[in-house]
Amino acid sequence: MSLTALAERIDARTPAHRDRAIDGLRALALLAVPTGHWLLGGFRLDGDGALHNASPLSTFGGLAPVSWVLQMLGIFFLVGGYASVLSYHRRKSTTGAWLRGRVARLGRPVLGVTAVWAAMIPVLSTLGVPGDTLRTGSTLVIQPLWFVGVYTVVTALTPYCVEAARKMGGWAAVPLLGSVAVVDFLRYGPFADAMPSWLSVLNILPGWLFAYQLGVSWGEGRIGRRGARLLLIGGTVLFAALLLAFHYPASMVGVLGEARTNSHPPSLLVLALAAAQSGAAILLRDRIGRLLRKPLLWAPVVVINLSAMTILCWHQTAMLAAAVPASFAGAVPGLTTGPDTVGWVLARMAWMPVFAGLLVLIARYARRFEAPWQTGTRAANARRAVAGLLATGFAVYALGLA
């Protein structure tokens, strides 16, 4: 079957009520995650042949605007809030059952990748992979999974977000913005030296709930084009002010050696970017929907959405599948050489299709973790128990390295 015929078949099977723009925005945000990690993350090879994390942003500060484009978690949470409120209203059971179903869909792929890595570590060690490489790989694999925990919490808050949206409309997200602003003032302002180091943790929930609440308000029909323009303009002005007047770090991702970071946990700059992105997304929704009426554009969006958690959970493994074998060969440009030259940037871009191909190959087998598991039989229960034990062991191992 030709690609055109396959695309037309997928298009014909899409329900008429499907909101293609929302799926398109989700796919765009999903693709930004591996693209950002593959492009802005690198390795250094030490004298013992072990891989250690490194970032081109440490050398090329001018690449920081690339991180503004690739940091699209604001869009992801916006779309997540929009989709969740629609699903919440269509639920045919209790709120608790609805929430358990959504958590299960998030948890199965996470359990799968962590269980597989727990089994792989002793095998790779036996094959001669250095311990430092295994620690680097484990850290990279576990890092994106924080998203699942945060997303689970904000999803659980959906009923409260709906109530807030009905009472306050789009303004329901403003207290969350204010909360993050207060914490940022305390940790970066004149009293910063007197503040406890854990203070930044207070930004995790309101920082990521901000865009989710915007999505819920949008799904409730409480944010229109006027509100979207306000978000776009206000977010852009705030973003520029924080960079130019308040000297926030320009990079939206953490940079080794930098004392401050915007994303872990989110700073006010992340919320400003999320506001601008959300406004743009709402304004472009109809145009995106019309564009995705074309089967050849719609088909990849469907595939990406069906593999959402697989992409999130396994993209770092795809990069490591190339880098770890290359480490035995020594200095391989774009893989094991330090990301501190223009040549590395060009070489890494050439490696990107290889990472994508490896991810597609891995996804052929890993997508089974997204499907509902069999229950009730003794063998199925035993498999789940073993997977749970392996996943717990890997989590303890990886988090102990952080």
Image (cartoon, rainbow, N blue to C red):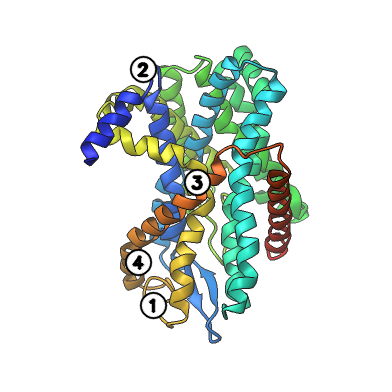
Q: Residues within 10 Å of mark 1 (few under 14, many from 20)?
A: some
Report the residue at 42% width, 47% height from top.
Answer: 32
The quadrant the C terminus occupies is bottom right
Q: Residue at x 35, y 25 (%)?
A: 13
Q: Which residue is mark 1?
A: 332
Q: Amino acid at mark 4?
A: Val
Screen quadrant of the N terminus: top left
Under circle 1, the secondary element is: loop
Residue at far bottom of view: 47
Residue bearing mark 3? 367
Residue nearest the viewer, comparing 42 with 239: 42
Q: Earlier in the sequence, mark 2 or mark 3?
A: 2
The answer to which quarter of the image holds residue 373 is: top right
Estimate the spatial distance between the alpha carbons at disc 1 and disc 2, rounded to whole Å. Answer: 49 Å
CA distance separating discs 2 and 3: 26 Å
Q: Which residue is mark 2?
A: 16
